[in-house]
Amino acid sequence: MNSHAPKKPRLSLGAPVLLVDLPDSLLAEVGTYLTPTTLALWAVAMTASPASWFSSGWQSPPSLASRAIMGQDEISDAAKIWEELNFEDVPKSLRVKLSDIDLGGMLVCMDAKHTLKSLKLTHCFGIFGAGLGPLRGSKVLRQIDLSLVGLHESPAIDAGDLALDEGTVICILDSIIGQSGSSLMHVQLPKRWREPQSRKMSNFLERFGEYLGSRQLACVAKTHRHSTTMCGELVQGTEEHPCILSFANMSGVQGQTCYKCLNSFCHDCGYMSCWVNPCHGCEKMFCDDCVVTSHCDVGACVGGDQKMSCDKCNLVMTCSGCESQFCSDCGQMEECTFCGCDTCEFCSSECESESCNAVSCFRCSEENIKAVRYCSDCEVRVCVECRVQTCKQERDGGRSSCAVCMRIILPWLLFDVETGDNFFS
């Protein structure tokens, strides 16, 4: 603790005790029980009105109490603590209420211009953009996610939930990429800014693409699956593989940078790992080392280009039988009624009874006595319960049942004798 800091006045007996009257060391101790993001909010709450920072252009320093809470007086490498600010560790009920003054106050308290490397405004729907002011001219910021959604959430949000002002944010981003020695690697924009794009946004994305190409970043793809040797080609963006994508659903998204690790890939060297793959669910790009992605085996999916999905969004499902992959738009996957696995139309069997919706995967049709099976004699494909009912109706009508059908239902009947049930009662 700073020994030259002014001492707080001694409280008189019976006087009410306010938080601001408590020793800074005690306030800092309370902060040790908080997550980093809530700790920053605690520091803002214990300083002078953040509104005064806003009026001074975010130039006023934090109070001594705030510095103690943030550890800036006792920890020489405190900057390392505040390299990332992600609001996902704050309750959503609080995130949606945060204002620009709250955000700006947090950034001032952590000296974000010189310390913060990653900022993700998850569900911060009340932010207009002015609160990002303390980041102007930052040379250390590497990633900023302004999409306002979580890692694997759909980026589609209601117009009323987007308070961010495009012009204000672009001005701050320009001040960052315009710095010599800027570290900015990745920007995730709100979907409503990307599709459709205003002229102002299109011009910024062009400048940002040129900035990324000028970074002279080397492709980190491995030359072989188990190799430590990297490709090393410069990632500068080409007409075929641009720095900023322009095709449907992914327009305005960076095409050569992984969202998670921020590594760059040239897409041109031909190595197996030289790709970042799009997810059409969360509309982010991921490398194979960070996230598993799958693509629909239908070349041109219903409604447009070939669908791809990360394993969290799960838009592309794998058939448990033939291991083919299909997206939900192509409608070729169903859930097996008996084991719950995903099965394609080629590997599944559907009960032909009008009153039944049972579907069996290939394995259940072979192994599960309840499943849908095909009778080669009467050429009927039904589940065992529907087959039993058919045999029962034939018996009640004085007709003999199909011998093959009887052999199919026999294991089920024996099973039910053991449990005390009787389908023929």
Image: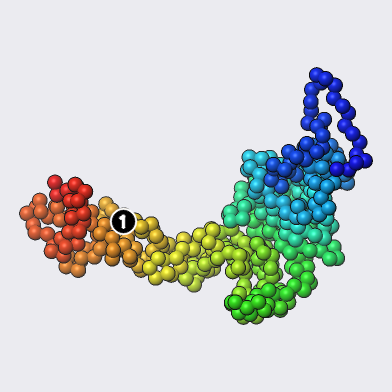
Say left or right for 203 vs 6. Answer: left
Q: Position of residue 366 (x, y in %)?
A: 28, 65
Q: Considering the numbered disc 1 on the image, is that residue within a helix, a strand or a loop?
A: loop
Q: Compare residues 47 and 400 and report the one nearer the observer.
A: 47
- Number of disc labels: 1
Q: Compare residues 252 and 342 and report the one nearer the observer.
A: 342
Q: Residue at x 53, y 58 (%)?
A: 313
Q: Is residue 101 visible?
A: no
Q: Position of residue 112 (x, y in %)?
A: 80, 52
- Colour treatment of the image: rainbow
Please tell me how crowded label 1 is: few (under 14), some (14-19), or many (20+) other residues with Cα within 10 Å: some
Q: Residue at x 85, y 43 (%)?
A: 1
Q: Which quadrant of the structure image shows residue 83? A: bottom right
Q: Is residue 143 visible?
A: yes
Q: Residue at x 14, y 52 (%)?
A: 393
Q: Which residue is mark 1?
A: 358
